[in-house]
Image (spheres, rainbow, N blue to C red):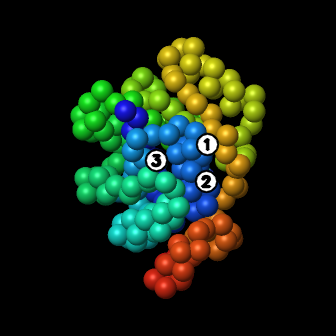
Amino acid sequence: MKIGFFGGTFDPPHSGHVRAASAFADQIRPDRLLIIPNYISPLKDKAVAPDEDRMRMCELAFSSVPGAEISDREIKAKGTSYTYRTVAALEREFRGAEIWMLLGSDSFMSLERWARWRALLCHCYIAVAMRGNEKPPLFTEKVRTYEMHYGARISLLHNEPVEVSSTEIRGHRSGLVPQAVAEYIREKGLYE
Ligand code: ATP
């Protein structure tokens, strides 16, 4: 059994997130794919949009990804959303399953800033979606180091990179969001 998860602030979810999740669903074929909006990221300020709006926008955004389920587990847990805790909870819930963590290449490159990152490399299979701005030698070197020194199991997804970030969308500098999300943002007056 393969349990995939994709964590993020999703403030808002955009086309880069959706493409990454679709590539993951196609290429890794998880039995479950949980999209997990965080409550508070350990590395970022609290999201701008309210939690319930981020949940709803994720439902709209990822509805095109086969099997994707939006999970409110980190939002319900409140506090700082540490990924190693989420992984431990998934391991308890899905005993014996492979836990697959989907990451964008920027998050993968900064994994060492995450709490208990070495444990994450041991406990999870990692799938990396390209964002289009990675520096090839540094990126390849990191993959090799993690594999050689920590026994990491890393799969690089073949996804067409979409160069967009939630920050750009909040600043109205990009339109790369699924249409239903764009409408929701407009109706609710988010990020104005
Ligand atoms: P922000 O601009 O607010 O920092 P973000 O666009 O990076 O946000 P997050 O919600 O922080 O979005 O990202 C959640 C996950 O999605 C991370 O693993 C991140 O690397 C990945 N991700 C974000 N944007 C893309 C993209 N364009 N392509 C592939 N993966 C992405």
Regarding residue 41, the answer to whether it shows in the image is no
Q: Mark 2 highlights which residue?
A: 19
Residue at position x 42%, y 23% from top? Answer: 122
As helix, strand or loop, the secondary structure at mark 3 comes to strand
Disc 3 from disc 2: Cα separation:
12 Å
Depicted 113 relative to depicted 104: above or below: above
Residue at position x 66%, y 59% from top? Answer: 164
Is the residue at mark 2 in contact range of ligand 1, meaning its CB lies under 8 Å from it? yes
Is the residue at mark 3 in contact range of ligand 1, meaning its CB lies under 8 Å from it? yes
- Between label 3 and label 2, give the one nearer the viewer: 2
Q: Is residue 51 left or right of residue 166?
A: left
Task: Pick whichever of labels 3 and 2 is earlier in the sequence.
Answer: 3
**Image quarter hosting the N terminus:** top left
Q: Which mark is residue 129?
A: 1
- Crowdedness of circle 2 by 10 Å Cα count: few (<14), some, many (20+)? some
| In-front residue for pair 87/179 | 179
- Which amino acid type corresponds to the residue marked 2 in the rendered image? Arg
The quadrant in which residue 85 appears is top left
Whether label 1 touches label 2, CB < 8 Å: yes
Q: Mark 3 highlights which residue?
A: 6
Q: Which mark is residue 181?
A: none
- Crowdedness of circle 1 by 10 Å Cα count: few (<14), some, many (20+)? many
- Crowdedness of circle 3 by 10 Å Cα count: few (<14), some, many (20+)? many
- Which amino acid type corresponds to the residue marked 1 in the rendered image? Ala
**Image quarter hosting the C terminus:** bottom right
Locate residue 49, reporting x and y percent: 44, 70
